[in-house]
Image (cartoon, helix red, strand yellow):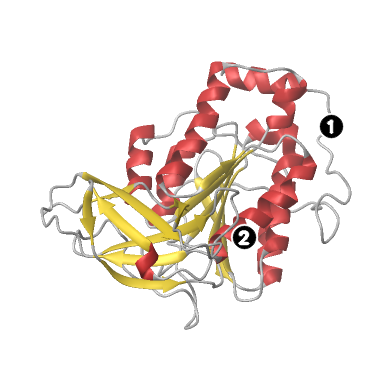
Amino acid sequence: MKIAAILCLGLGIPALLIAGSIRGGAAPAEPAVIQAPRQQAPPPMKPPGQDSPKGQTQISVSVDLVNLQALVTDKKDNIITGLKAGNFTLYEDNVKQEITNFTPVEAGMTVVMLVEFSKMVQWFIEDVWNAIFGFADSLRRGDWVAVIGYDMRPTILTDFTQNRAELMDALMRFNTPAFSESNLCDALIFTLDRVEEIEGKVAVLLVSTGMDTFSKHLYDEALAKCKSSNASIYAIGIGQSVRLRYNLDDISLLMADNRLRSVAEFTGGEAFFPRFTSEFPSIFKNISAMLRNQYSLAYVSTNTKKDGKFRKVRLEARADLNGDGKLDDLKVKTRSGYIAREK
């Protein structure tokens, strides 16, 4: 592909892990190469044990009850906590809805790390390592995390675990890419299918170039899946340093960035495009803060039609932050809507 030739301008530049850029130790040493099973699909991802994240229907399953996770910030992007249900106003397709359930959440995270690991990334492998090990260092006791690597097809490297040793063993398998293909759309659908029954807040940390070589599923199918999923996607676009170094501005690269922005926007997440190693710690800090300080809301839709159509959701928040007796308009980040279940 043309894009592969462009990215390989980095040929001859060793992909060295910058010492100290990954807190907690040296670079991975000789772990197994990721190779997806050739005859059978990876096993279903299930939260193990009685204390694992419990199942619950996601927002697209029924139009009767719609669940939302929302992050509220002021105009300076400071996260606002301590709000009540009365501070929020909710609309579906511009029709006001009544909030029936409301919980100010400050809790642990349930995260799937979905990591591209094809030969597409071999010239900036340090970006991958900085992303996955740096995010692992941001996790706290009680957080659940699973790891999926993808190239030609996605492979579950570890199911949901709170065991740090298991997590590190999985991450250390990201060593030498095996295949040239990067099928992002297939990997997204595969992952979102497996988090449908996770209760409460669930996020996908997508570490990817945004490129898609020949997925079986179309991009529109992946976007539709994002719209119907209960998971928020936080994307980290890797390879930006190489693009900056060689002044690459190919249309394929711009489209790749747009894919990452779109899947994040539709799910109420955010996309980041770090160009320097020093940017990674602040990105992980931001993602952690956003996931740990969301509000959980639910409402019964006044639209009882089960027509399979996309319903736009708009959530507004106002509060008197400075005690002057005037309500301030706040910024709310949540998913843009959901797909109603068909009969």
Q: What residue type is labelled 1?
A: Pro
Please state which of residues 288 and 32 is positioned toward the viewer in this rendering: 288
**Quarter of the figure with residue 89:** bottom left
Horizontally, residue 33 falls left or right of residue 103, namely: right
Residue 277 percent location from the top left of the image: 78, 42
**Residue designated by label 1:** 14
Looking at the picture, how far across and down is residue 81, in whole percent?
53, 67
Secondary element under disc 1, as helix, strand or loop, is loop
Q: Which residue is drawn at 55% across and 48% down?
A: 75
Q: Does 113 sit above or below residue 275? A: below
Indicate the amino acid at tag 2: Ser
276 relative position to 200: left or right: right
Badge 1 or badge 2: first in the primary sequence: 1
Whether residue 211 is visible: no
Q: Mark 2 points at which residue?
A: 288
The CA span between labels 1 and 2 is 31 Å
Asked if the residues shown at circle 1 and circle 2 are in contact, with their CB atoms under 8 angstroms apart, the answer is no
As drawn, which residue projects farthest toward the right?
A: 19
Quadrant of the rendering where the C terminus is positioned = bottom left
Query: Residue at the spot x=45%, y=48% of the render?
Result: 39
